[in-house]
Amino acid sequence: MDRVPILKIGDVLLVSIQGDLDDQSVLTLQEDLAERVVATGAVGVIIDITAVEIVDSFVGRMLSTIAGMSRMLDAETIVVGMRPAVAITLVELGLSLGGLRTALDLEKGIALLGRTASAPLDDLSAVGQ
Amino acid sequence: MDRVPILKIGDVLLVSIQGDLDDQSVLTLQEDLAERVVATGAVGVIIDITAVEIVDSFVGRMLSTIAGMSRMLDAETIVVGMRPAVAITLVELGLSLGGLRTALDLEKGIALLGRTASAPLDDLSAVGQ
C-alpha cells in the first residue's frame, strides 16, 4: 500500500483512511503525521474512517497512538465518519478508544476543533456551517 | 477495494484517491459523486491525487469523465496534489487532461473555487489563507 496522504485545510490536517493498513503503513503514517504537525503548526488532526468497515484492536491502537502523539505536539485528534456498525462492534468488543474524540462527519469535526481551539481557527469554523 | 469516500467541506466535495482503482470502483465513484453533487448542491469537486504515483490513460479518462459529469451538474472539478513525476509523464504521454483544472494542493484548490464560484463560497475561501 502507498503512503496515506495527509491533506491540510487551514490549521487542520486531514487523513482519510482507505482500505487496510499494514504495520509498516501505520508506522509511516504516524511518522509523517508527527512531522507534518510540527512543520505546519497544526492545531488539529482529523482522521476520516468513512471507508473503514472493520475497526479491530490494531486500528484502535493506531488511532489512540496518533491521538497521544498529536497531543504531545499540541494538536487535538478527532475521528470522523465512523459507521454505525463500527460503533456497535467497538462497544461490543469493549474497545473504548479512550482519549479520542469523535464527530459525525468532517464538517462537524472542523466545527468541534473551532470551538475548542483558540483564535487561529476562527476563520475555519465558518466552513462547518 | 472499498468505496472511495466522498467528504464534504462547505460547498465542496473532496475525494482522495489512494491506491489503484479497478473498473468497478471507478464506476461506483462516478455514480456516488454525481449523486452527492446533486444531493448537496456542491459548487466544486476537488480530487486529491497526492497518493497516486502513476496516472495512465485509464486514470486520465476517469478524471475527465468526473469533470464532465460535474460540469453538467453545475460543479467545477479541480485536481490537486499532482506529483512532479506524474506531471512529467502526462506531458510525455501526450495526455493533456483537457477540461480539467489543477491546483498545487487542497488549500489552493479551495481558493481557486472560491475565486470562480459565486457567493456561497465566500466563507470557504478564508480556509485557503
Image: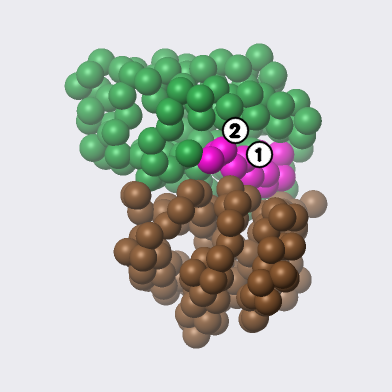
Chain colours: A green, B brown
Q: Residue at x 34, y 49 (%)?
A: B2
The quarter of the picture where residue B74 lies is: bottom right
The question of residue B60 being in magenta is answered with no
Task: Decide if residue B19 is on the left or right side of residue A6.
Answer: left
Of A115 and A73, nearer the camera is: A73
The circle on residue A45 is 2
* Same-chain status of marks 1 and 2: yes
* Residue A99 appears left or right of A5: left
| Residue furthest front as drawn | B92
At horizontal 55% and vertical 76% (from top left) the residue drawn is B64
**Quarter containing the C terminus of chain A:** bottom right
For the magenta stretch, what is the residue range? Answer: A2-12
Q: Would you name the residue on which mark 1 appears?
A: A12
Q: Position of residue B59 (x, y in %)?
A: 52, 66
A30 or A1: which is nearer to us?
Answer: A1
How far apart, in angstroms, are the residues tagged by discs 1 and 2? 6 Å
Tag 1 and tag 2, C-beta contact below 8 Å: yes
